[in-house]
Amino acid sequence: MNTVLFLVLPIALLVPQPSSQMDMSMDQIAESYVKLVLAVGTHDADFVDAYYGPPEWTHDAEAHTKEQLIARADTLLTNLERIAMTARFDEMGYLRLQYLTKQTRAVRARVELLNGKKFSFDEEAEVVYDVKPPVYGKEYFEEILEKLSKALPAGEPGATVQQRYEAYRSAFIIPKDKLDAVFTAAIDECRKRTKEHLELPEGESFVVEYVTDKPWSGYNWYKGKSHSVIQVNTDLPIFVDRAIDLAAHEGYPGHHVYNALLEENLARKRGWVEFTVYPLFSPQSLIAEGSANFGVQVVFPGEERIEWEKNTLFPLAGLDGSRAGDFYKIHLLTEKLNYAGNEAARGYLNGTLNKTEATNWLVRYGLMSPERAEQRVRFIEKYRSYVINYNLGQDLVREFIEARGGVSSDPEKRWKEFGELLSSPRLPSGLK
């Protein structure tokens, strides 16, 4: 099937550039893109999430102002526009062109933000993550809360739905002295199942660290050569459902597998150096987070997860396995509230909610404890519109995989399409 790529760039980028800045090849653009990302990282400590390219490329990273970085991004975008109008590629070549264009556009926007430009929540989501996030009003969440209220135990007289939910969930907390055993079992099972369907690079591995005082619950730090460090934040109680969620999302077949396959299939086999660096605030993150979240369902579909946890994880955690089925009925209802975090971020970043109001919104519509809601607001303050990558990313990845035949009733096809997505430079606008 022929692939047609339409690239829309600001008019300013079409202004003629000095000849010394023109006529770069794709490989030259890729190298310049990597060096640009590294240079932005000197102004933003959170920007470069992973880098495993040539060490010498970091040497001149600090010698640039923000204005110079914007100009460098403009030069790359001008060259990419020229290539888009003149060159012919196969599908992977077009995906690469689109990848470099959208990623560079996002890098430029991040520098503008660092330089004082104001973006609304939706503007930032579109320019940085290549999507237009949906809007959900209070009515949407109130309807779900009403259904959940009917499903939860009555609780104390006068208790809110959130309080009843917290009281119910308190019976499913993993004791701290059992965390490592539970996570190890979850990781081992996710890895075993993933390796049955995907060919992973030889020697791939990761280690788990338990940390505190973080604005997130889990994080994968990819180190290159198919190795990751996965950190689990133990500031707040960890519920039994988070074991599989974190094992799959951060490990197999989530971030660890995604990064290892990109390194193996694109950076090493194709020599595409742009995949030796991962700028966190870019369209790639929506694919990374969306595939990691959807990967939970791929590795542990429906009833298989409940049955395995009932017989393995619940006993390891010292919990009553006979309650697993009821626990996940409630859990499925609460998952429909995931977009509450997006609306809290939209309001907070746009200035229509203050910090207290955003926290209260998350307590009411995200069913979070006050402590967990405060942690989430800290996440929004640090990572801004990044929150869309988890839920919207998951929905877009699911729709893409299922549209290509990767439905739950055909697990082999689902794994095949999922593996191909993890090994490609496809970005959010390419999922539709």
Image (cartoon, rainbow, N blue to C red):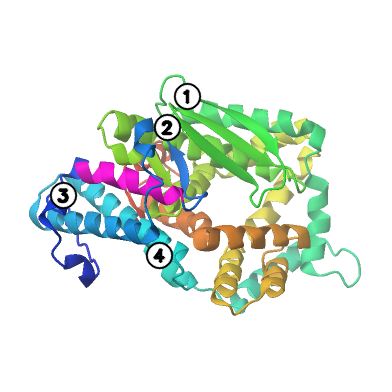
Region in magenta: 28-42
Which residue of the protein is positioned furthest toward the left in this rendering? Answer: 86
* Residue that carries the numbered disc 3 in the rendered image: 1
Observer-nearest of 76 and 3: 76
Mark 1 Cα shell of 10 Å, populated few (<14), some (14-19), many (≥20): some
Mark 3 and mark 4 residues within 8 Å of each other at the beta carbon? no
Residue name at image x 22 percent, y 50 percent:
97
Query: In the rendered image, which residue does mark 2 sit on?
Result: 260
Tell me if residue 425 can be seen. Answer: no
- The span from disc 3 to disc 2 (Cα, nearest Å) is 28 Å
Q: Which residue is mark 1?
A: 204
Q: Amino acid at mark 3?
A: Met
Residue at numbered disc 4: 112
Looking at marks 3 and 2 on the same chain, the residue that comes earlier in the sequence is marked by: 3
Q: Along the polypeptide, which appears first: circle 3 or circle 1?
A: 3
Q: Position of residue 215 (x, y in %)?
A: 65, 52
Q: Secondary structure at mark 4?
A: helix
Label 1 secondary element: loop
Q: Secondary structure at mark 2?
A: helix
Classify 10 Å Cα crowding around label 2: few (below 14), some (14-19), many (20 and above). many
Label 4 crowd bin: few (<14), some (14–19), many (20+), radius 10 Å: some
Nearer to us in this view, 192 or 67: 67
Q: CA distance from mark 4 to mark 2?
A: 31 Å
Badge 1 amino acid: Glu
